[in-house]
Amino acid sequence: MMDKPSTTSLLRTKSDQLVEAISAAMGATKSPISEAVGGPETLSRKSSRRLAAASPGRSSSSIGKNTHIRKSRSAQLKFDLDEVSSGAALSRASSASLGLSFSFTGFTVPPDEIADLKPFSDDDIPEDIEAGTRKMKIQAEPTLPIYLKFTEVCYKVVIKGVTSTREKEILTGISGSVDPGEVLAMMGPSGSGKTTLLSLLGGRIKEPTGGGSITYNEQPYSKLLKSRIGFVTQDDILFPHLTVRETLTYAARLRLPKTLTKEEKEKRAIDVIYELGLERCQDTMIGGSFVRGVSGGERKRVCIGNEIIINPSLLFLDEPTSGLDSTTALRMVEILHDIAEAGKTVITTIHQPSSRLFHKFDKLILLGKGSLLYFGKASEAMVYFSAIGCSPLISMNPAEFLLDLANGNLNDVSVPSELEDKVQIGNSDRETGNGKPTPIVVHEYLVEAYETQVAESEKKKLMAPMMIDEELKSKVFSIKREWGASWCEQYSILFWRGLKERRYDYFSWLRITQVIATALILGMLWWQSGGDSPKQMREQSGLLFFIAVFWGFFPVFTAIFTFPQERAMLNKERSADMYRLSAYFLARTTSDIPLDLILPVLFLLVVYFMAGLKHDADAFFLTVLTTFLCIVAAQGLGLAIGATLMDLKKATTLASVTVMTFMLAGGYFVKKVPVFISWLRYLSYNYQTYKLLLKVQYKEKNDWVDGIKVGSGVKEVCILLAMVFGYRLLAYISLRRMKLHSGA
């Protein structure tokens, strides 16, 4: 304990010696540091303070050579360390400037570490994989500037009850504007109408139902604007088994204009990967609930990349920072600023940003219960609320303060005198238990204050015509609405994308084990059961019926999930006009065919020879073909049920009843079906498959097997083919009738 004063004085003495050593080494010329801080005495005092703050026991974390320390070293050491001849002086200068807690008695920097102490720029700082540190240039090519203006926007929805219907107002008289190069943030509590307003501005909802106008360069919305708008949804809707590079490459090939070649589109995807700092994870799968992949921040950047790849003039984002830590969220907002600086108009909703995030926004809209509480510069929001008597009584994050006001919570907030006058003592309707006004009273006061003090002047600004060239106005709708790829190219791209995405599901060990285990059990139960006698044929017909049932049951419940699970992706991509529905549907249904063929062949290779079925190459391949026809027909039924209902519980229930009915009418359990229900057999693919399998195995032996006449098989093939195309046509019509959220 007695050594502390002497140690402190020793540190100060060493600090003074340090300044003298640096001055001597720099020669007679005046040091830039001395000029910057006011001479050697000032430097000595600052070095002593910095050195004392970093003494042992006060800061152990400063020893690490991390990025922010290296930045401070770059900012503070402006002289050329190569001119310092003494190694000890060099080490002391570096340590004092950096604030490192080295012992200065006899310390010398090893020669191999001297190179690391040289001054360097921020460009040398390694990039943070998650948050990113480098300044990125977003979109080099010019962007058409679009000025967005919205006035008195209202939106209502009709809620249908059991006995009556009523209208609910979601938005009431929202006005504002945002120019190219600006980032507009929408804040408000949950249910305040942020996402609805964003969807209206982005054209995802057709038009305001309660009145108001939305203009883009003084022009109303048109479907031609779709190619100018990027919309990032709150949920990260991506295929989990595709890599980052594959996701952006497929988006580029589908969305970029036909005038670009395939190589140019792929190059654009790579450029976006580097612009968003995704190069380190470009070959990593996106991942999902059961698949390990990229981080949350990287996934969000991929979603942004999907939209900026088309160089949009307007970019809308729904809560892009939700679920991210503060550092990653800050980097996300910095990326939005980089995008805006390229001439784009950026509008985003944000739930509860940190104070650093809040100060990054150019403009702010604060919503409360669908009403506008503030619109203007984000930097002036606190000044405005202080002017109407609402100021935080303690140090608070501005965003937290504004959200408290929007919720009607005045805890730790000064109550305006006008509001106190409105609250009568003892009036429980207008006063809470702690004497504060109720949230309803606070909301009414904030809406009234904005309308009387700000709204009129803002409306005058919005009503004034914008000085926009007629050429700029016409350019908004000058581009003809066209697809980024031809129908055949769309089909090809979607086919290979579907093949890559679903190969992991089809060839999972669980599915392969299930098929092989079933095949082995069947092979052992019907071990070498072949024969020419009616009894042997009757026993073996049970195996053939099970094959028809198994491969008629399995694909139905796999196909049911296809469209309900991909509905969000289909909505998103169709809203952006990425492809025609017909190209998607055909690619989605045909990309399953190669995968559907592999497991049945593996199954039959085991069962066919173990059970001693007809030893003939033609018979084997006809059995495979018949089974495959059954699978495709059953798959069509599953697709039709899933696309029609779009609800997994309802679809599963209906499929269970349908498959059970088809199985019972399949000709094995009931030989003589009553006339009034005999038509069910013609709808049962199990029955048609069973008859074909009997024909392949026993046509040459007997015309009747187990009470079923074995015909030529042409009729059965035609019925199965009709099912293959009929069920799929029903599924396509159901998808075509499905309403997209975009209103497209």
Image (cartoon, rainbow, N blue to C red):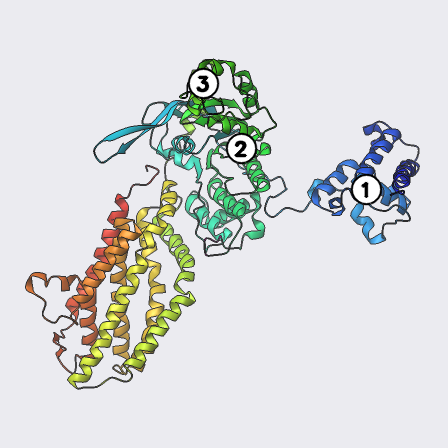
Residue linked to disc 3: 445
Of badges 2 and 3, the one in the foreground is: 3
Q: CA distance from mark 1 to mark 2?
A: 45 Å
Dot 1 or dot 2, earlier in sequence? 1
At x 43%, y 46%, the residue is 237
Residue 55, disc: 1
Dot 1 or dot 3, earlier in sequence? 1
Q: Is residue 720 visible?
A: no
- Give how far across and how far down residue 169 sits, in percent: 34, 27
Query: In the rendered structure, which amino acid carries the disc numbered 1?
Result: Ser
Residue 548, disc: none
- Give how far across and how far down residue 324 sits, in percent: 54, 43
Q: Nearer the viewer, residue 32 or 379?
A: 379
Query: In the rendered structure, which amino acid carries the disc numbered 2?
Result: Ala
- Secondary structure beneath dot 1 equals loop
Of badges 1 and 2, the one in the foreground is: 1
Magenta residues? 286-290
Q: Nearer the viewer, residue 603 or 433?
A: 433
Q: CA distance from mark 1 to mark 3?
A: 54 Å
Q: Is residue 573 left or right of residue 655?
A: right
Count residues near mark 2 (Cα–Cα under 10 Å), then give few for <14, some for 14-19, many for 20+.
Answer: many
Residue that sits furthest to the front in the current view:
426
Q: Nearer the viewer, residue 366 or 698?
A: 366
Residue linked to disc 2: 340
Q: Is residue 715 visible?
A: yes
154 w.r.t. 21: above or below? above
Q: Is residue 341 left or right of residue 83?
A: left
